Image (cartoon, helix red, strand yellow):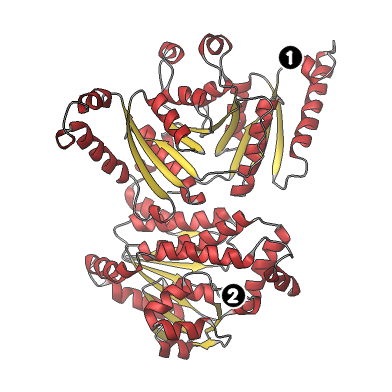
Amino acid sequence: MRVQLKTIMCTTDFSDFSNLSVRYAMALAREFDAKLYICHVVDVSSAVMYGEAMVDISQQHQRMVQYAHEQLEQLTAGYPIDWEPIVVAGHAADEICRMAKENAADLVVCATHGRSGLKRLILGSVAERLMQILPCPLLIIRVLQPDADFKKQLSMKRILVGCDFSADSSLALTHGLSIAQEFQSELHLVNVDESLKNQEASNRVQKPEDSLFEDLQDQLNQRLKGLVSDESCNWCTLKTAVLAGQPYEALSAYAEKNDIDLIVLGVRGRGLVEKLFVGSTTDRVVRRASCPVLAVRPVDQEKPIRRRQRGLKSQKTDRLNVQSDLFSAARHGEIVTLNFHNNLLLRAVDLSARDRLLNYLDQISHNRDIKVVVFMGSIQKTGREEYIKFYNHILDANLDRNAIHKMYNAVDQLILKIVDLDKFVIHGDRGQVISLFLNISLACDYRIIADDTVYQNPYLGLGMAPKGGGAFFLTKMLGYAKAHEILLSDQDITAHDALQMGIVDKVVPPETLEEKALEAAKRYANIPAQSLVGVKRLLNFSRKELGDYLEFENQELLRIVGPPDLSSDFWEKVDQYR
């Protein structure tokens, strides 16, 4: 399941160190379109930092709070994010934890000075305390110098997850994989085993073919690769490594050598004496790493226990019958029907909506009782007008190239999810359909449309290229010449033309569309599941390069689009349609 970051909280004491974490959190909130809370805990004992000290405690507290709000306003001035200040008095770690719970934070961001040795033991660490008590993951920014500045855009090109195959590292992998898929990063899964040191030493006096060390490394590498599904590898480049030595030393050195942008580790509970004098791997990595560290700890397990007590039967029904602002879904025995309320294109900028859809499809994928999925396109589509509105929104919102790329990726993820889904997928549609949604339909296994359906190519009017795998699917289905003709034609394709071409399987009257789609679903549901899945996998074997094609397609579209301003021909044409 994808990890959603809807609410982020960061902390600052207004030092140069902690203000860096605020700038990092602001960039992260903008990237995920998340709500940001910036928290400052007033320390009454340090009144001097807020201005002149006062004898009256209430006046002193009021002045501190006012000063804090002024500082927060300065920190966020001119940055386009949805944020709120939180100013409270008390013990820093406890208050931050309390506010994270009250605001249902999905992530807390803080900075650490990276102290070590006796100084750390005497002074303690807010970040270290937060790792043990927070109800959500903690992203720790280690600041090496007080005048450091966050000058570059948020970078997540290479993400390292420490994996020891425990429940803690499994939870860390879930978060690391989700972020890697979001940014299409290199995902480095690294296992470190102290016992391998002896094997490595003995390897120096053995022949390579007799080396137990190399055999064990190969086994562990294969085990690491097995932690990530083939589908996930469409969105991130998987790399594995098995290292010998102390985990914190090996992980820190690997991160430095491979220019890692983020380290993700699970936090394991320890006794007080052991923690103080031995330290956890996560804590030690934080004090050594030159990049941010995401510490993930298990959360309260009460809710899953209560859900199990409700009974499996009702749980299945509740989870597959869904009503949301984006889609509604209902289960009919071995069939799930999913109706879109709003057109996907206009919702592509809403990452939370995309995640709700993909998480729901993950649920279907893991449910062995479901054999057929029926997608019904929204009846609220407006054809070319909608396509123009989409790019006008990008221009008005002043989104950068990375944000546009992420929106294209959202479409790609849906297409690849449909292709990889071990269910038979039927697509039904009607009305004005732009090429993007024809392409999503082509990713499905069976297409049924109403006779009022018209396929349009609005991208030609803007000098754009098609998005969604159209060239890929049409070339395989119709051949190069016919695909070339369709993609470069501004003529609408009627429902009956589409049927004659072979890009849809059935045309029906509009009032019977859903009924006929469900009839087709029931017909395919009567086929044994292993046959449905087997045939689909065989037919999709030639689509193995689809992921590479979609990323190439993105790069070609981004080349045409250029920066989201009026300096390129594309955006000048978009502006003409305002």
Residue in view at x 59 percent, y 75 percent: 381
Residue in view at x 47 percent, y 47 percent: 180
Q: Which one is in front, 391 or 65?
A: 391
Q: Mark 2 sits on what residue?
A: 381
> Label 2 sits on what residue type?
Lys
Give the quadrant of residue 512.
bottom left
Q: Mark 1 sits on what residue?
A: 46
Residue 151 appears anywhere in the view: yes
Q: Is residue 95 above or below residue 211?
A: above
Structural crowding at the residue carrying mark 1, measured as other residues with C-alpha within 10 Å and reported as few (<14), some (14–19) or many (≥20) = few
Determine whether, in the image, residue 482 is placed left or right of residue 149.
left
Quadrant housing the C terminus:
bottom right
Q: Is residue 1 above or below residue 398?
A: above
Q: Position of residue 521 (x, y in %)?
A: 34, 74
Foreground mark, 2 or 1, reads 1
Q: CA distance from mark 2 to mark 1?
A: 59 Å
Determine whether, in the image, residue 179 is placed left or right of residue 233.
right
Residue in view at x 28 percent, y 66 percent: 537
Q: Which one is in front, 201 or 145?
A: 201
Seen as rendered, the residue at the extreme left is 210
Q: Position of residue 167 (x, y in %)?
A: 35, 34
Q: Position of residue 248 (x, y in %)?
A: 41, 25
CB under 8 Å between discs 2 and 1: no
Determine whether, in the image, residue 87 is placed left or right of residue 380.
right
Q: Position of residue 215 (x, y in %)?
A: 20, 37
> Label 1 sits on what residue type?
Ser
